[in-house]
Image (cartoon, rainbow, N blue to C red):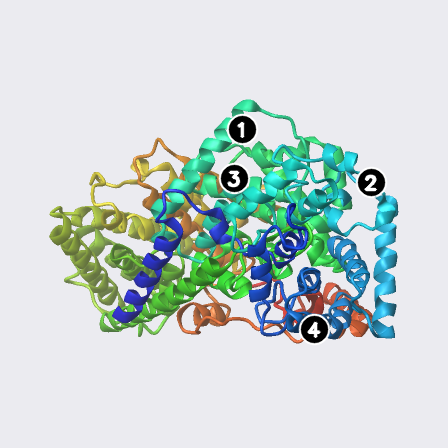
Amino acid sequence: MVSSQSSVQTLVEKFKLEMFSSSTFDVYSFVSPSAYETAWLAMVPDQSHGDQPMFNCCLDWVLNNQKEEEFWGESRPDGRPTIDALLATLACVLALKMWNVGDTLIQKGLAFVEKNTGELLKEKSGNLPRWFTIAFCGMIELAEARGLDVLPSEELKALMADVFFKRQQILETEGLVDQCPYPPLLSYLEVLPSTCDVDGELILKNLSKDGSLFQSPSATARAFMATKESKCEKYLQSLIRRCSHGVPPMYPMDGEFVKLCLVNQILLLGLAEYFTEEIGEILSEVYRTYKKQESRATLIDNLTPAKMYKNSLAFRLLRMHGYDVSPWSFCWFLRHEDIMAQMENNSGQFRSAMLTVHRATDLMFQGEYELKEARSFARKMLEKNTVQLSCCEEDDLVIVPNLQTLIEHELDIPWIARMDYLDHRFWIEATQVDSLWLGKASLYRLSCLQAEKLMVLAVENFKFRQLIYQSELQQLEKWAKDWGLRDMGFGREKTTYCYYAAATSSSSTLPPDSLARLIVAKTAILVTVADDFFDMEGSLNELRALTEAVERWDGQHLSGHCRTIFDALDGFVTDMANKHLHQHSSDILENLRNMWRETFRSWMMESSWMKSGYVPSMEEYIETGMTSIAVHMLVLPPYYFINPKLPKHKLILSHYETITKLLMAAARLLNDIQSYQKEQIDGKTNLVLLTSKAHPEAGIEDSIAHVQEILDEKTRELVEHAFMDHSSDLPKPVKLLHLSCLKTFQMFFHTCNRFDSDTLLSHDIERALYRPVEIRKSPEPVKPQKKKEFLTTFATLNQAFKHHGNGAFAREGFLRPVREDGNWRKVCSPPKFSLSVSI
């Protein structure tokens, strides 16, 4: 374990040195060079010596960067070329041919294009992205004009005939500079056919102030060759001075966007604890920009997926770190019906943006109806594309690898019910070395060597945390066994469940957090055993005797299960108090005892109600139930170790912080929604049952919906207090502990009672604690010609699922199609449980 920790720290320091050591963050060190753009600059002739390239460094880059597989451009995580490689390879071949160098490389590149064009085109099964259709046709025409036989076989020519036809349709229906969400035709100047009749005046009219044509190096290179405009030359020279080792996909890059993506990647991979200062500095800078833009209140000048992606990502990251940001910073599209219609009509180009919008709305506060509306719209857009399964993933103008997998993950289980630690694993395995891809004419990776190093760090950190968790679980199991809590002979034995919840909701591997995890896990075990004893095992006399012993804090006259529970509780509380006294020189023993006394009183009260048949009022039930759920026992004792300077006043309900009361209420509501049927059988009361009794004209589903509505309100309030309550004395780590505990309860009780099941959490526990991280290989695709048959099967099975509901067929799961890298594969989805299913 020591070597693992050392390995992680070494990787962290190395990454910090390379990425953050300079006072100025180098955006371009985090951007992969584009073979396509670099090749186009390599084709620009020198103005004084037309037989030589103006940018020798670009030609050298092309000569030295052909991959072993004989292509240039991007590849998938498994090493196979993307469709982008066809364009990049042709561009590099043209650059070498223009200067009569690299004959061997040219022949290898042409052989690659001939060998792979058919396969890559068929893989798309007629769903070629717009950018590829425009650019590839143009590159073939340019290659043939140079005397290169790019399509030697009749089969390839037949395949390309359809692509050329599609390009012609685009050219006939779009203007050169239309207002649209995707790059205008003129931004593809380097590959437009002569029939487009682009004159120099139109080019100069559309140059940006920096001399570029839509910030595209390739289009600007072609514009310079056509017009000899000095502004274009200055732009290109500036670009080469800045990026002499390969041209980026666009220039200048949005540095703030790149930084946000880097922060997002660090958080998603579970590495935030190592980069706290760096993340803080970046977000502070982003917030300053946000305030300036807010004060200017500029009109919406254009609609782009990248802009929406950036704005919603900034909102989420800033809000998570306590900054006051308005939802309208990215929800502005809700005020424009024409823009929303445009987005729906071009939904395929907004998929990644809508995913980010949906994720931003996870942090919804009470009363933010615009976020509720934005979430509904984003979900509708994402579900629409998931059902259609026909949009080309590369049509999206902000490319996120494995996007469909990420969308399904987001829509399947809400963020509030997902454990952060397992989310980190998901992102490691789903995105692998890829962070974000962005570009005009191709798939450009926004993450390069640095992102690969970040991924290595994420994998090592996950391994290290697993070692820690395995060791702590062994300690916990020994503790539970030594105190007799694992062999009570009744109720639920949930030692592993309790530790899993404490570990996967933790955000750090630092020593104080290890102690906090064990405190939470031991508390959860004691609460489970004692609660089960009060519910199902103890007689009224035994329960009264145990409660009175806790009040006196003296278990001398107890015996049997009562003595076991008291002794374990006393040993745990005493040990915790002694640790705090030793570490921080203050005595918290009586505070801890008082919290447990209050909890036992609430259990005794509920048992008295059940055994006597008394039905409490709703107010009585809520007051007692908020305490009996015992969630405050999970978050209050760790306070003293997370923040030893907290005031040590006597903790009683009236003095609980608002966030603690919200957590207690939310946990009770979550439990009641999923356990009302079981508790009705056991003769216990429940808020769902009380609501139904108070409104007999309404059905049980209406009662559930009413309680769920209250729960949603409490959840939004708690999220706001966790991130934004600056009036509270509680430090941020303590607030986040409350949020983690809420997420844990949401995980246990989302759609069904997973805590009471012996199997539903087994897979997650295995992945969290034992199974090594898997770098996922691409699944074997369903062949394109089988697509129609595959969708027919899917439709039949899906209809059967709807017909059978939660019956036997649903329990077996059903097949659904997932489109990934242009291929189709079958996935067996887990069944969905409705709230009415008997637990």
Q: Name the front one of labels 1 and 4.
A: 4
Is residue 174 visible from the viewing direction of this image? yes
Q: Earlier in the sequence, mark 3 or mark 4?
A: 4
Q: Residue 140, relative to residue 776: is it above or below?
A: above
Residue under pointer 4: 107
**Which residue: 64% across, 57% down?**
39
- Mark 3 surroundings: few (<14), some (14-19) or many (≥20) residues within 10 A: many
Q: Name the front one of labels 2 and 1.
A: 2
Is residue 706 visible from the viewing direction of this image? no
- For the residues labelled 2 and 3, the Cα–Cα distance comes to 34 Å
Q: Nearer the viewer, residue 463 or 86?
A: 86
Q: Amino acid at mark 2?
A: Gly
**Which residue: 85% across, 74% down?**
155
Residue 175, which numbered label? Answer: 2
Residue under pointer 3: 315
Residue under pointer 1: 293
Q: Quadrant of residue 8?
A: bottom left
- Mark 2–mark 4 contact, CB under 8 Å? no
Q: Amino acid at mark 4?
A: Gln
Outermost residue to the front = 49
Q: Name the front one of labels 1 and 3.
A: 1
- For the residues labelled 2 and 1, the Cα–Cα distance comes to 31 Å
